[in-house]
Image (cartoon, rainbow, N blue to C red):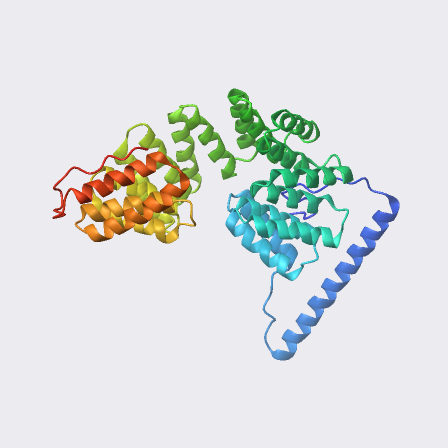
Amino acid sequence: MKITRDYTQPFFRQPKRHPVRNMLIAALLGALLGLAVVWQRDAVESVIGTLSGSPATPTPRPSELATRATELFLAGDLTGAEELLARAVAERPDNIAYLYEHGWLLIELGRFEAAEAHGAAITQLDARDERGFALKAAALTWQGQPAVAIPIALSGLELNPRFAPLHATLTRAYVDSERWADGLDAGQRGLSIEADDVGVIRAYAYALQSVGSYDEAVNYLQRAIELRPTYMPIHFELAGLYLARDEDQSAIDIYNRILSLDPRNARAMLRLCLAYRKVGEFSRALGFCEDSAANDPADAEAHFQLGHLYYRDRQFQRSRDAFEQCLRHDDGFYDLSCRYRLGLSHYYTGECARGWALLRESLDLAQGTGDNVTIGNILKGLDAIESDPQCIEDAAAPVSLED
């Protein structure tokens, strides 16, 4: 069934304003002018098509792109929705509604700097539009700058104290600044305004977790899932909470539910790998890690976990390949962990010189971090190579790594 979208009601909440007579008149005039422009454009395209002997190729209008984006969003396809809204923004860079909704999708997809830029663009178009403040504050919070985000969110609330997304962002920013009581208060204020706003519910659950109210957090996340069953981030957060509470089967059930909705979701596969590894089902864990790496070959974490499992099973050639892929796609987070494990894997495949070089590089990196566990693992590897000058494969048991 095709969903007909009224684009005055976006899927990311816009501010509620109190209408006045002049604004209504202006809106009606604007709508009439817009219709006139559209009719004129369609008429010109029709004439051109008649004169050329062929109909003009229809190009989706920005509003049509936004409508289709809404359909994809409601179906859980955030990537597809973002691509369509990006096209709408490219055609109408002065449309605040498009900028705002596209900005929130960018945040959902982890593209925080681009979302922050959208917030700045909204502020340039209208310095009193709270949506610009909401986007900037949210993007900064997710970038790890909550202290910078808080005054921006508060400034937005001065313009519209009933704008729920600002309360949601402020909740998360307070929690990340270790102002837990303020976070709870902000979340409660947001819920008093929009009790069914999924963003506010999600943020309040985050605040509840920060003070150890896990049962309440579970209830709120379950409520959010009821309201938006195809919205994957809430599923992941609830499953992560279950894992932290050692309710492993409940987490596994949620990840399987995600895969029933999105069979190629590499992140769910990876989380199932970790969950099964946690409960000691290493064979099933390995299968899901392999599936995750296959579906998202650029995910360094998937290759890291896959290499870890291969190494545990003494499949050193495969662990070597996995750790090489980890280093290839890593942005710095897994560099040390993958590098020294790659060195050990090289050693156990008979490549002593390469293994030694990687372990020495890793030792220099580890000493800069002060991570004594990792330093100890690397020294064990260097000692193993030194005590095995002939580097005979399988001459010794693999180094047992401490996690």
Q: In this view of the protein, which residue sits in the foreground, 372 or 137?
A: 372
Image position, residue 350 (x, y; %): 16, 50
Q: In this view of the protein, which residue sits in the foreground, 275 or 92?
A: 275
> Which residue appears at 65% of the width and 79% of the height?
51
Image position, residue 371 (x, y; %): 38, 36
Q: Residue lying farthest right?
A: 21
Q: In the picture provided, is 72 more to the left or to the right than 297?
A: right
Q: Is residue 326 visible?
A: yes
Q: In this view of the protein, which residue sits in the foreground, 398 or 260?
A: 398
Above or below 325: residue 50: below
Q: In the picture provided, is 184 more to the left or to the right than 155?
A: left
> Which residue appears at 65% of the width and 40% of the height?
149
Q: Is residue 230 visible?
A: no
- The quarter of the image holding the C terminus is top left
Image position, residue 272 (x, y; %): 36, 35
Above or below 63: residue 161: above
Above or below 244: residue 157: below
> Which residue appears at 32% of the width and 38% of the height?
375
Q: In the picture provided, is 179 more to the left or to the right than 376?
A: right
> Which residue appears at 36% of the width and 42% of the height?
366
What number of labels is visible? 0
